[in-house]
């Protein structure tokens, strides 16, 4: 399938190098594979978040040839990458076979993309089980998560490259095991707002160990909308933090309709 696009018809703010932090967005702005998205985004941004959500789909894992092309494009366009590991790993599931498959998938995606020298790998520690229901035993779930994370480190994953993302449950639940293993955090601002968590308190507790920030708006109770859909008070709180932040920020949206107004709102900060 041909995913050609005319770069001359794209008019986005050029924000590469505009901030003390690395600004990026996802590899799914065009409804196309990763490489056309990288070619589109490279001139405008510092970084691309590689969206590798589904471990069950082998085509979701970039081939070695594709990785080499990403390396070439990164060098050519002064572009770095971060990797969002699959979201279907279920590392706290009661079934040991499910956890084993999850660890194996995480290792496979990590090793394949490691030649890209990613700035960070974002990891979900899902409270839901692979069958879809929530876990009923909080303490047992934490123990299984800790065991899975230890297995990943034993298997060769650098814990300092992993950033655990906040989901629907309080991030404080997993904070002790994440910090004990030497991992960092990914603060998803949209998730904090969607699930009613305290934004400023999360900044206070987690910002020092936050390697990546996901920013996006909420519209009609749905997240991952453009920054035009982020309320003014949230935007002001985020901007205040970004003034002294020098790590990664990903505008986590999945269409040009959401990316364009997001970059224009970011441009106001330049």
Image (spheres, helix red, strand yellow):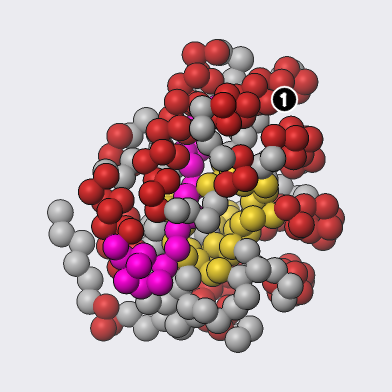
Q: Residues within 10 Å of mark 1 (few under 14, many from 20)?
A: many
Specify the quadrant of the image occupied by residue 14.
bottom left
- Residue 52 in picture, x, y percent from top left: 41, 44
Q: Residue at x 53, y 20 (%)?
A: 99
**Viewer-proximal residue among 247 and 203:** 247
Whether 88 is drawn above or below 99: the answer is below
Whether 231 is drawn above or below 170: the answer is below
- Residue 45 in picture, x, y percent from top left: 46, 73
Q: Residue at x 64, y 21 (%)?
A: 147
Figure disc tally: 1
Q: Residue at x 36, y 73 (%)?
A: 77
Q: Residue at x 29, y 63 (%)?
A: 72
Describe the element under mark 1 as helix, strand or loop. Answer: helix
> Pointer 1: what residue?
142
Q: Is residue 59 left or right of residue 119?
A: left
Whether 140 is drawn above or below 88: the answer is above
What segment is highlighted magenta in the picture? 72-91
**Viewer-proximal residue among 155 and 261:** 155
Placement of the N terminus among the 4 image quadrants: bottom left
Is any atom of residue 63 visible in this view? yes
Is any atom of residue 37 visible in this view? no
């Amino acid at each position: 399938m041909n995913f050609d696009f005319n770069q001359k018809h794209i008019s986005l703010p050029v924000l590469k190098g505009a901030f003390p932090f690395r600004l990026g967005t996802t590899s799914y702005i065009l409804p196309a594979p990763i490489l056309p998205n990288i070619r589109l985004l490279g001139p405008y941004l510092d970084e691309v978040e590689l969206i590798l959500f589904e471990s069950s789909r082998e085509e979701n894992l970039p081939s070695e040839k594709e990785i080499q092309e990403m390396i070439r494009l990164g060098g050519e366009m002064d572009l770095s990458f971060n990797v969002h590991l699959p979201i279907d790993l279920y590392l706290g599931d009661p079934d040991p076979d499910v956890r084993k498959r999850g660890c194996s998938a995480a290792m496979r995606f990590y090793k394949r993309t490691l030649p890209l020298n990613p700035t960070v790998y974002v990891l979900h520690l899902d409270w839901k089980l692979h069958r879809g229901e929530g876990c009923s035993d909080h303490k047992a779930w934490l123990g299984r998560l800790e065991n899975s994370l230890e297995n990943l480190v034993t298997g060769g994953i650098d814990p300092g490259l992993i950033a655990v993302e906040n989901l629907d449950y309080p991030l404080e639940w997993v904070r002790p095991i994440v910090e004990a293993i030497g991992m960092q955090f990914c603060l998803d601002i949209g998730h904090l707002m969607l699930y009613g968590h305290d934004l400023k308190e999360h900044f206070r507790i987690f910002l020092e160990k936050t390697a990546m920030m996901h920013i996006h708006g909420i519209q009609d109770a749905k997240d991952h909308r453009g920054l035009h859909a982020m309320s003014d008070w949230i935007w002001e709180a985020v901007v205040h933090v970004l003034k002294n932040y020098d790590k990664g920020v990903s505008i986590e949206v999945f269409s040009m309709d959401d990316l364009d107004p997001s970059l224009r709102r970011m441009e106001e900060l330049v």
